[in-house]
């Protein structure tokens, strides 16, 4: 099996959802801690916005690791 960007993007990484208090600006913060030191996270006013951003950041981070020949963390 070829482990390319599509392979990793289809894995089910854990997403931690944090509601940001209105006094701190509000919104949703999503984190993907299983990507290790990358600690991929994204903020949005709503879940859908934050999720779209998270997936874009996830793709960029994984692509960077692949291009550098580094191991990509996989979900537990």
Image: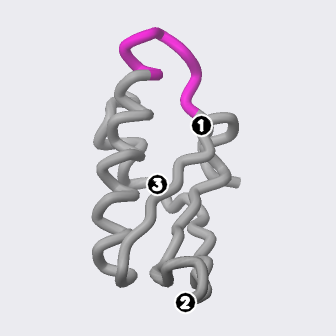
Between 48 and 8, the one lying in front of the other is: 48
Which residue, given by chain and number where applicable, does mark 1 sit on?
A: 38
Q: Secondary structure at mark 3?
A: loop
Extreme top residue here? 68
Q: Secondary structure at mark 2?
A: helix
Q: Earlier in the sequence, mark 3 or mark 1?
A: 3
Q: Which residues are magenta?
A: 65-72
The N terminus lies in quadrant: top left
Which residue is rendered at x = 47% and y = 10% of the image? 69
Locate residue 26 relative to residue 32 in the image: left or right: left
Which residue is rendered at x = 70% and y = 54% of the image? 76
Q: Earlier in the sequence, mark 2 or mark 1?
A: 2
As for residue 51 lying within the magenta part, the answer is no
Circle 3 or circle 1, nearest the eye: 1
Cα distance, mark 2 to mark 3? 33 Å
Q: Main secondary structure of the magenta part?
A: loop
Residue 22's tag is: 2
Say if 31 sits above or below 61 in the image.
Answer: below
Which residue is rendered at x = 46% and y = 54% of the image? 11
Cα distance, mark 3 to mark 1? 16 Å
Whether label 2 touches label 3, CB < 8 Å: no
- Give the percent coordinates (x, y) of residue 35: 61, 43
Which residue, given by chain and number where applicable, does mark 3 sit on?
A: 11
Q: Residues within 10 Å of mark 2 (few under 14, many from 20)?
A: few
- Give the percent coordinates (x, y) of residue 34: 66, 50
- Give the percent coordinates (x, y) of residue 50: 37, 69
Between 7 and 14, the one lying in front of the other is: 14
Whether label 3 touches label 1, CB < 8 Å: no
Circle 2 or circle 1, nearest the eye: 2
């Amino acid at each position: 099996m070829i482990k390319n960007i599509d392979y990793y993007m289809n894995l089910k990484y854990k997403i931690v959802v944090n509601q940001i208090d209105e006094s701190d600006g509000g919104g949703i913060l999503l984190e993907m801690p299983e990507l290790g030191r990358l600690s991929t996270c994204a903020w949005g006013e709503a879940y859908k916005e934050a999720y779209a951003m998270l997936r874009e950041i996830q793709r960029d981070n994984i692509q960077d690791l692949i291009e550098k020949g580094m191991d990509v963390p996989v979900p537990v």
